[in-house]
Amino acid sequence: MKTLQRMRTDDWGVFLDLAVAEGWRVPESELALLQGPLTDSAWVLKHDRQTCGCVTAVAAGHCGWIGNLIVPATLRGRGYGGRLFRHALKRLTAQGCGSLWLTASPLGRPLYERHGFVAIDEIERWVRPAAAAETSAPQPDSETLALLAADAAVWGAPRTALLQPLLAAGKVAVTGSTAALLQPGSHLQVLGPWYSSSLCPRENRTVLTRLLAAAGGGEVCADVPLSSPVRMMLSACGFRAAGRTVLMVRGDRSGIDLSGLVALASLGSIG
């Protein structure tokens, strides 16, 4: 008998094993969200006691994000991925999300296109390997309201409930119209969300410098739209491109303006 249920404590170990086998990076900050405030957003499909796949469906304002859709390689081709995906769509629609988003690999893109999703950009992952710690000290992160306002301006509505847990543990840097968050982690730190309505190079360089100082020598990762102007800046700071996905959307995009988006708040699963 096949059942869909919320992921429980013992399911997360299986999910992480599947993610490692797939070469996915799952940041600690995102995992803490999905195991805590967003626990109702993570689902697992089982046949008897065997895990047939997982998915997350995160609602934030009128936007919904589908992520972490994974089926064990030995069980693909049996419709499990489609069932999980349709479940995520149904849940987000029931929560009033009229704008649905995801990032797609080549393997998953045909499924999403069959359900009406269209590609609007590519997301390029940039990684700065662990290195010697920076010598400059981070500035105080007292600018969380500015970051929340910048996030709401891009996505058309406040996403405070989603971002507050990340902000509580992270470091914020704001200069002029540019604001960004560094999410901490013992093995991987995430740079994002990062917004800049003016796309001013000086502002973006200042924010990046501050947050890399806060990161010390740890590995840092950012998911950046291909249309973003900061890619050369990241390269100059020791980041290297490490793969791409496709940013896809279905539904109402009124009020959403991605022109000021520099980096997503996650590695593709919560926007």
Image: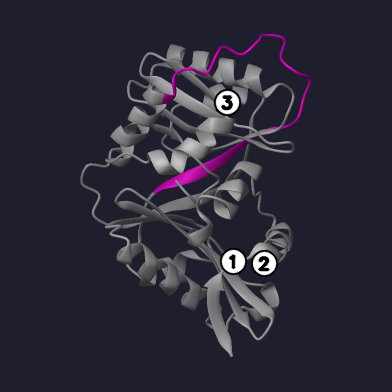
Q: In the picture, which quadrant includes the N terminus?
A: bottom right
- Dot 2: within a 10 Å radius of its alpha carbon, few (fewer than 14), some, or many (20 or more) residues? some
Q: Position of residue 118 (x, y in %)?
A: 34, 59
Q: Residue 140, labelled with which disc?
A: none
Task: Give the residue pinned by disc 1.
Answer: 7
Task: Give the residue pinned by disc 3.
Answer: 234
Task: Give the residue pinned by disc 2.
Answer: 11
* Residue stretch in magenta: 121-144
Foreground: disc 3 or disc 1 = 1
- Dot 3: within a 10 Å radius of its alpha carbon, few (fewer than 14), some, or many (20 or more) residues? some
Answer with mark 2 or mark 3, whichever residue precedes in sequence. 2
**Is there any visible trace of residue 192 in the rendered image?**
no
For numbered disc 2, what is the local secondary structure?
helix
Q: Hey, which quadrant is residue 93 in on the image?
A: bottom left
- Dot 1: within a 10 Å radius of its alpha carbon, few (fewer than 14), some, or many (20 or more) residues? many
Answer with mark 3 or mark 1, whichever residue precedes in sequence. 1
> Which of 229/69 is in front?
69
**Above/below status of 114 relative to 1:** above
Q: CA distance from mark 2 to mark 1?
A: 6 Å
For numbered disc 1, what is the local secondary structure?
loop
Relative to 237, is 157 on the left or the right?
left
The verdict on residue 96 being magenta is: no
